[in-house]
């Protein structure tokens, strides 16, 4: 698996590598000079030639690689925006939008990975447009609040525009870096960051979970169907056991587990008793939660793999 930090804030990189200031990340760039997304793409955007296939950072897990983030990736946003709107009249920049996705794919091929997961920033800018429209499929993470509901409605307005804007960049023979001919497929959403009560979301959180679910199914999905960016619900339910359409998984707050997970740099479901640094009832509660999350994520991973193999 290759995970890609395409957010200029570099939160994923920070989480994986455990750095906490700019000095630490600069040391990473020095030790692994071609490990980040910006360095590989820089020659294209400087007009100096083709991208340089990255050499991602290999994590403690031999099967997991990280294409590091870089604050400077935000600098290409303006060039991409111009290219998407004026490339027909400026031949020199017509390859910019497709170069982002092709660079990531070639990096994945070099590593012979099975999956590439891209962490995007929470925006509807040109960089996200190019990353998104050159992907095979997408999952939408949701939180139970008003702003998330508004974001779902914003996506319903944004996706048709993105799909139209990249039409001139799709698989054209004269282009070095075309964008996928087919748009990405929506394969589900994730409900997260709620507080549980008696095994279910507390009432105040369930209120917004219901609203967001309705926005996904009644506002977003009809748009996706028109754009051929959906999969049949029957296919989803064949591989994902859920009582709510396209709700891939429901993940409650991690609470105290997340602090220990970040402290020791391991997934929260792999925390040991010593790493949880608690005893008695507190430890027992944390261990029960850890086991529940272990089962939850294991089931999610299996469903994800099975679904992708059959769409």
Image (tube, helix red, strand yellow):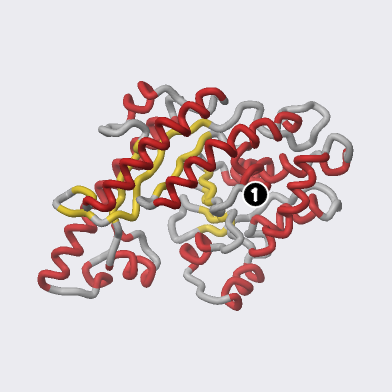
Residue placed most toward the observer, 66 or 8: 8
Circle 1 packing at 10 Å, graded few (<14), some (14-19), many (20+), is: some
Report which quarter residue 174 is drawn in: top right
Residue 51 position within the rendered picture, expressed as x and y whole percent measured from the top left: 75, 49
Query: Does residue 111 appear left or right of residue 254 in this picture?
Result: right
Using the image, determine if residue 23 lies above or below residue 167.
Answer: below
Q: At 11% from the left edge and 69% from the top edge, which residue is drawn?
A: 281
Using the image, determine if residue 253 lies above or below residue 246.
Answer: below
Q: In this figure, what is the number of numbered marks?
A: 1
Using the image, determine if residue 130 lies above or below residue 7.
Answer: above
Residue placed most toward the observer, 56 or 203: 203
Residue placed most toward the observer, 305 or 144: 144
Residue 13 position within the rendered picture, expressed as x and y whole percent measured from the top left: 53, 62
Residue 225 position within the rendered picture, expressed as x and y whole percent measured from the top left: 50, 24
Q: At 61% from the left edge and 41% from the top edge, which residue is drawn?
A: 109
Query: Does residue 306 appear left or right of residue 169 in this picture?
Result: left
Query: Does residue 208 appear left or right of residue 183 in this picture?
Result: left
Residue 303 position within the rendered picture, expressed as x and y whole percent measured from the top left: 34, 35
Q: At 45% from the left edge and 25% from the top edge, which residue is drawn?
A: 231
The secondary element bearing badge 1 is classed as loop
The residue that disc 1 covers is: 125
Using the image, determine if residue 168 lies above or below residue 115.
Answer: above
Q: At 79% from the left edge and 26% from the top edge, which residue is drawn?
A: 173
Report which quarter residue 57 is drawn in: bottom right
- List the single residue furthest toward the left: 280
Residue placed most toward the observer, 223 or 48: 223
Query: Does residue 209 appear left or right of residue 291 in this picture?
Result: right
């Amino acid at each position: 698996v290759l995970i890609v930090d395409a957010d200029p804030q570099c939160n994923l990189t920070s989480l994986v590598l455990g750095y906490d200031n700019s000095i630490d990340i600069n040391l990473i760039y020095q030790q692994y000079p071609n490990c980040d997304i910006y360095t590989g793409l820089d020659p294209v955007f400087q007009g100096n030639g083709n991208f340089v296939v990255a050499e991602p950072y290999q994590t403690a897990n031999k099967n997991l690689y990280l294409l590091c983030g870089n604050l400077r990736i935000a600098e290409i946003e303006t060039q991409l925006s111009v290219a998407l709107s004026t490339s027909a009249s400026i031949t020199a920049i017509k390859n910019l939008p497709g170069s982002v996705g092709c660079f990531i794919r070639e990096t994945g091929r070099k590593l012979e990975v099975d999956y590439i997961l891209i962490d995007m920033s929470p925006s509807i800018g040109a960089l996200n447009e190019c990353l998104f429209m050159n992907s095979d499929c997408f999952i939408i993470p949701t939180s139970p609040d008003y702003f998330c509901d508004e974001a779902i409605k914003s996506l319903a307005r944004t996706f048709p525009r993105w799909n139209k804007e990249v039409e001139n960049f799709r698989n054209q023979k004269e282009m070095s870096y075309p964008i996928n001919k087919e748009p990405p497929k929506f394969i589900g959403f994730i409900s997260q960051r709620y507080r549980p009560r008696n095994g279910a979301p507390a009432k105040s959180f369930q209120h917004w979970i219901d609203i967001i679910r309705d926005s996904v199914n009644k506002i977003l999905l009809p748009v996706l169907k028109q754009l051929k960016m959906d999969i049949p619900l029957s296919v989803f339910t064949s591989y994902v056991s859920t009582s709510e359409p396209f709700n891939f998984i429901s993940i409650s707050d991690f609470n105290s587990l997340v602090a220990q997970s970040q402290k020791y740099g391991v997934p929260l479901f792999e925390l040991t008793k010593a790493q949880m640094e608690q005893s008695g009832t507190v430890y027992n509660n944390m261990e029960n939660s850890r086991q529940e999350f272990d089962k939850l994520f294991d089931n999610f991973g299996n469903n994800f793999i099975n679904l992708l193999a059959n769409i």
